[in-house]
Amino acid sequence: MIAGILFLALQLEEKFRIPSPLGLIALSYTAHFGFQQLPILTVDAEQFAVLVISLLPVLLIADSLELKVADLKQHGLSLLYLAVASVALSVMVALLISGWLFADYALSNAAVIVLFAMVLATDPVSVVSIFSKFELPHRLKFLAEGESLLNDATALIVFVFVGLYALGGGEITAGYVTEISLEVVFGSVAIGMLVGFAGLVVMKSTENRIAEMMVLIITGYGAFEIAEFFYKLLNLLGGHSHLHLSGILACIFATITVNHVMTRSVAEEDIRLGREEAELHLEAEKPATSAGLIGNVLRRIKATVEERERHLRTREDIQLLSMVANTILFVAMAEMIHVNLLWKYRVEILVMFLATTLIRGLMMWLFAWLANRTEKMVDINFRWWGVLTFAGIKGGLSIVMLTMIPATFEYLEMFKAVVIGVIVLSTFVYSGVLIAIIGSNKLQFRADKIEENRLHEVR
């Protein structure tokens, strides 16, 4: 069933340009109700959370392979605002308007933070799928895809270390937020990079493509697990700590570390290939050519091409695993949706969807205002603002957060309905608007891309 759903979704994408996430969701719901709503992969939210956490690293690995260190250096300031500052500011705005949005509910500040953190986490898979069908400037793609990937970590940090901490009676102070943020961010990044370098050492021991892919997967999952259970590692070493780091952030930076070295290796191989081809041409033009020298050069060229192809095919294999994992998650999500519950809280869902859309639009407008006045940030025009605003499609991580809320929380049912409802609405509405914006401005986006390439060549 999963293979069939993925095949049909890819056919819809190829034949009718329907983004695969939309096809996956629609086909998953159809299959679920076709099987008379029988649970196939999950029975309850807790099992769904286990499934998501099991598959999340491979999704992160696939998306992180699209991030390049050069882009992070060049657009790091812009990404810092999009993935970190905008999430924090959005939560602050939510706290200011929560009394008006949910007047019928006596939501505490902690509950508001928990609720909004869940719906601020975005889905990079949907964004990448839509962007792959259009010609867009590299900078715009990097900002949208990078923000979709990294803001998951920020939203989860806010959810766990601020929202749930306060919900459990913890006192939120500026000092606490600053301290825990620095510990989690720098600790997770350090673990990710260390595990990434360890993975590279192992990867150099093999020339087998499948083995190389396994090392990449082990690296991503290893970083994720070490960060998530870092306190257990400290306790084994004799420490007494409850420090919980971000598995998402660690997995992302482990993959970026491996990918950076692999990408640099491919670039070096291209340069070496060019030199060896030139050497071969020179030798061939000589009156008396050396068969031995030509044979050595041909062998080096063959080895270089094989290594380059191995790296590229490894990336393709990871992308395939990611597509299968994403299909499994959408099928499982269909099993989690209860139409009666969504209808019961339809007003709250619609209010939350509109509120988060307006808040995101405001955050992207503020980003455009700042970026257009800062030389180190990318200039944002109205078209780009529209793309960045509606690239905030929600995903399965939000449901994982749902399962972390205490079962005794009095508004848990409402939170479940709102989060799942916002995920469904954002997937269809945001995707449709995003396609409309890009499709109606495709000539302008193509011109932006040509101009970007021209400036890059000049530099």
Image (cartoon, rainbow, N blue to C red):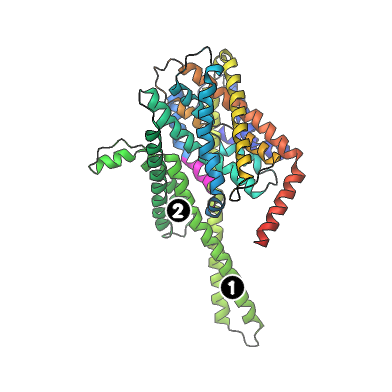
Q: Identify the residue under disc 2.
A: 211
Residue found farthest to the left = 238
Give amino acid for label 2.
Ala
Residue positioned 61% across, 30% down in the render = 427
**Image quarter hosting the C terminus:** bottom right
Q: Is residue 45 above or below residue 201?
A: above
- Measured as percent of width and height from the top left, residue 45 is found at 46, 24
Asked if one can make out residue 309 in the rendered structure from this viewpoint, the answer is yes
Pointers 1 and 2 in contact (C-beta within 8 Å): no
- Measured as percent of width and height from the top left, residue 383 is found at 70, 40
**Image quarter hosting the N terminus:** top right
Residue positioned 53% across, 50% down in the render = 72
Give amino acid for label 1.
Arg
- Measured as percent of width and height from the top left, residue 289 is found at 61, 84
Tag 2 secondary structure = helix
Q: Quadrant of residue 148?
A: top right
Residue positioned 61% across, 39% down in the render = 127
Give left or right: position of 227 versus 261: left
Q: Identify the residue under disc 1.
A: 275
**Does the magenta stretch mainly form a helix, a strand or a loop?**
helix
Residue positioned 53% across, 20% down in the render = 98
Q: Give whichever of 196, 287 is nearer the camera.
A: 196
- Please give the range of residues in magenta: 57-68
- Measured as percent of width and height from the top left, residue 271 is found at 58, 68
Residue 101: assigned label = none
Give left or right: position of 27 versus 325: right
Asked if one can make out residue 48 in the rendered structure from this viewpoint, the answer is no
